[in-house]
Image: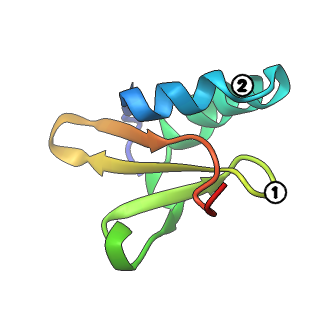
Amino acid sequence: MSDTRYKIEITKQAQKDITKLSDKLKNKLKDILRHKIAVTPYEGKPLIGKLNGYYSVRLSFQDRIVYRIEDECCVVVVIRAKTHYGQ
C-alpha cells in the first residue's frame, strides 16, 4: 500500500444523513472517514447488485457509510451516512 491519503467528498444526500445522526455518531463518522476510509478505502465491504462498485463500512448496528472510490483523483465520495435498510 502507498502512503496516499484519499480526499473525502460528501454528497448532498450524505450531508442530509449526517445532520440526522447523534453527536456521538457524527464523531464516530469523522474518525472512520479520517483514519480508515481516507487511508485504506478498499478495506470496506464491496457491495453487490444495484450498488455494485460501492463500498460500505459499519457506523452503528444499523447505519452504514456507503461510498465509491475514484482512484484516478484519489477521492472517496460518500453517498450515504445512515441506514440503507428502509428506515
Q: Position of residue 4 (x, y in %)?
A: 36, 35
Q: Which residue is the site of mark 1?
A: 61
**Displayed quadrant of residue 25:** top right
Front residue (pair 81, 38): 81
- Which of the labelled discs sits on residue 26, or is there none? 2
Quarter of the rendering occupied by the C terminus = bottom right
Front residue (pair 2, 13): 13
Q: Position of residue 39 (x, y in %)?
A: 50, 39
Query: Pointers 2 and 1 in contact (CB under 8 A)?
Result: no
Q: Amino acid at mark 2?
A: Lys
In the displayed structure image, the side of residue 13 where residue 33 appears, left or right: right
**Displayed quadrant of residue 48:** bottom left
Q: Under tag 1, what secondary structure?
A: loop
- Which of the labelled discs sits on residue 7, or is there none? none
Q: Residues within 10 Å of mark 2 (few under 14, many from 20)?
A: some
Colouring chosen for the image of the structure: rainbow
Residue beneath the point at 60% across and 27% down: 18
Front residue (pair 54, 74): 54
Q: Amino acid at mark 1?
A: Phe
Q: Is 40 above or below relative to 53?
A: above
In the displayed structure image, the side of residue 53 where residue 35 appears, left or right: right
Q: List the single residue furthest toward the left.
A: 72
